[in-house]
Image (spheres, helix red, strand yellow):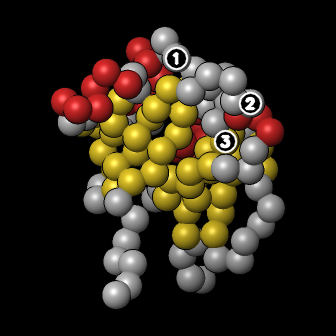
C-alpha cells in the first residue's frame, strides 16, 4: 500500500470573509470554485479546483497566519506575469531562498496565508 498523490490542501481565512477570499482566489489568481458536498456547506468556506488537486478554503478564528511557515506553492509557467500582476494590485512580493533549478517568490494573501509562486527554470 502506498500513498498515490495529494487529493487536496486546505488554507483558512477568518470567518465571514468568504466573498473577499473568492474575489482574490477566483478573481485574481483565476482558480475555479467547485461545489462543496452538502454535508459540509454549513461549515463556512468554499472549495477551489486546481488541476487534479482541490484547494479547500476553510474558516478559522484565533489563528495568526503570519507566524507560520505553512504555505501553498503554485507552480506557474510565467513568473514575470505573476510578479507584475500581483505587484500592480499592491501585493508585497518577498524574495525566497534560492533553490537550484527554480525561480520563486512569496507573498501573503489578503488573509495572511503565505503563498509561494514557483517556476521550473528551463535548462540552458
Residue at disc 1, secondary structure: loop
Quarter of the image holding residue 102?
bottom right
| Disc 2 from disc 1: Cα separation | 13 Å
State left or right for residue 23 relative to residue 67. left
**Can you say whether 43 is above or below 1 in the image?**
above
Q: Position of residue 48 (x, y in %)?
A: 33, 39
Q: Which residue shows up at 38% across the image and 25% down it?
A: 43
The reply to whether discs 1 and 3 touch (Cβ–Cβ < 8 Å) is no
Residue at mark 1? 15
Can residue 22 be seen from the camera position used here? no
Q: Earlier in the sequence, mark 2 or mark 1?
A: 1
| Disc 2 from disc 3: Cα separation | 11 Å
Residue at mark 2? 64
Residue at disc 3, secondary structure: strand
Q: Nearer the viewer, residue 122 or 54?
A: 54
- Determine the residue located farthest toward the bottom in the rendered image: 1
Q: Which residue shows up at 40% across the image and 45% down it?
A: 55
- Determine the residue located farthest toward the top in the rendered image: 16
| Disc 1 from disc 3: Cα separation | 18 Å
Residue at mark 3? 114
Q: Position of residue 18 (x, y in %)?
A: 43, 18
Q: Position of residue 9 (x, y in %)?
A: 45, 51
Q: Earlier in the sequence, mark 2 or mark 3?
A: 2
Q: Nearer the viewer, residue 97 or 14?
A: 14
Please identify the quadrant where the C terminus is shown.
bottom right
Can residue 64 be seen from the camera position used here? yes
Quarter of the image holding residue 83?
top right
- Determine the residue located farthest toward the front in the rendered image: 39
Amino acid at each position: 500500500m502506498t500513498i498515490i498523490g495529494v487529493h487536496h490542501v486546505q488554507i483558512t481565512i477568518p470567518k465571514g470573509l468568504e466573498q473577499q477570499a473568492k474575489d482574490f482566489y477566483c478573481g485574481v489568481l483565476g482558480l475555479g470554485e467547485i461545489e462543496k458536498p452538502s454535508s459540509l456547506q454549513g461549515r463556512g468556506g468554499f472549495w477551489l479546483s486546481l488541476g487534479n488537486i482541490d484547494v479547500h478554503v476553510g474558516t478559522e478564528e484565533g489563528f495568526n497566519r503570519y507566524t507560520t511557515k505553512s504555505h501553498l506553492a503554485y507552480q506557474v509557467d510565467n513568473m514575470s506575469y505573476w510578479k507584475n500582476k500581483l505587484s500592480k494590485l499592491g501585493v508585497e512580493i518577498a524574495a525566497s531562498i534560492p533553490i537550484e533549478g527554480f525561480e520563486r517568490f512569496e507573498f501573503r494573501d489578503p488573509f495572511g496565508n503565505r503563498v509561494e509562486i514557483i517556476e521550473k527554470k528551463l535548462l540552458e
